[in-house]
Image: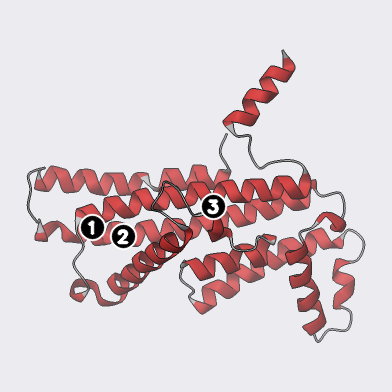
């Protein structure tokens, strides 16, 4: 079973499939540009980016909830997460802030903290570029550079993945702010972006799953390999 975040992400992406089906139904499959249908391509770019951002925030929240639920004590929390919390408490003007994490209160503190981080991101209008995604997972669950997992095949290196994501997110911004005057978008670009984001989500989810398993001893979900081993052990 995949994570809840991935299930929601896959469900959201059905909207993109519907847009592309509409594009094909109205414009056909022969070669050539369909300028009157370009609005569908631009809409798809905006939606894919939005769904990518939602996926990252959802799986970060899901991972934190998993850590809170299955960690027996704060001693098992990731070092980077501990450092971030310690710094926040040190800078807090409330002299009694340290008691917010005393005893078992650290679990409640972590959950409330994630909500504050998400609210702060919304206020700052951050975009889901590589740097911001890295910062999200570092501050939320203590994963240092989740983007280091964004590599596959031979040519898609981590560096290229970061550049490609940032390029598409910038395009989304151009579409959202300039509308018809923004750069033209081809259907092939939508297909490329969609496949790319699916890969990013898979790599990000895999990294998160490994991380929470290392912290708690329990994964967010069982991979096919792990599931197979579990079944073998029962027989």
Q: Residue at x 69, y 24 (%)?
A: 230
Left or right, residue 152 beside residue 78: left
Q: Residue furthest right?
A: 103
- Bin the neighbour count of mark 1 within 10 Å (Cα to Cα): few under 14, some 14-19, many 20 and up: many
Would you name the residue on which mark 2 appears? Answer: 45
Say which residue appears at 59% left-offset and 69% top-offset. 135
- Residue 41's tag is 1
In the shown orientation, is residue 208 left or right of residue 192? right
Q: Residue 217 in the image: x percent, y percent?
A: 77, 42
**Residue 175 percent coordinates (x, y):** 28, 70
Q: Quadrant of the N terminus?
A: top right
Q: Earlier in the sequence, mark 1 or mark 3?
A: 1
Task: List the single residue furthest toward the bottom.
Answer: 93
| Residue pictured at 25% horizontal, 56% vertical | 189
- Give the mark toward the camera: 1 or 3: 3
Of all residues, the one furthest to the front in this rendering is 154
Is the residue under label 2 in contact with that under label 3 (CB below 8 Å)? no
Decide: marks 1, 2 in contact (CB < 8 A)?
yes
Residue 204: assigned label? 3
* Quadrant (top left, top right, bottom left, bottom right) of the C terminus: top right
User: SS of the residue at dot 1?
Assistant: helix
Residue 19 position within the rendered picture, expressed as x and y whole percent measured from the top left: 25, 49
Q: Nearer the viewer, residue 214 or 52?
A: 214
């Amino acid at each position: 079973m995949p994570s809840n975040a991935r299930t929601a992400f896959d469900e959201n992406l059905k909207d993109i499939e519907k847009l592309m089906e509409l594009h094909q139904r109205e414009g056909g499959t022969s070669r050539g540009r369909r300028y009157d249908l370009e609005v569908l391509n631009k809409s798809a770019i905006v939606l894919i980016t939005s769904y990518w951002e939602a996926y990252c925030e959802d799986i970060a929240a899901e991972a934190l909830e998993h850590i809170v639920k299955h960690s027996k004590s704060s001693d098992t929390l990731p070092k980077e997460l501990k450092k971030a919390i310690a710094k926040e408490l040190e800078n807090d003007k409330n002299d009694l802030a340290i008691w917010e994490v005393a005893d078992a209160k650290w679990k409640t503190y972590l959950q409330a903290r994630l909500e504050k981080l998400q609210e702060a991101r919304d206020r700052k209008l951050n975009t889901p570029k590589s740097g911001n995604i890295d910062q999200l997972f570092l501050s939320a669950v203590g994963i240092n550079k989740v983007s280091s997992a964004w590599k596959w095949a031979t040519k898609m290196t981590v560096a290229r993945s970061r550049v490609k994501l940032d390029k598409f997110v910038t395009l989304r911004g151009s579409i959202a702010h300039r509308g018809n005057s923004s750069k033209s978008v081809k259907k092939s670009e939508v297909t490329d972006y969609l496949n790319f984001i699916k890969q990013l989500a898979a790599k990000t989810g895999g990294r998160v799953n490994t991380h929470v398993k290392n912290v708690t001893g329990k994964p967010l979900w069982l991979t096919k390999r792990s599931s197979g081993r579990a079944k073998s052990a029962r027989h």
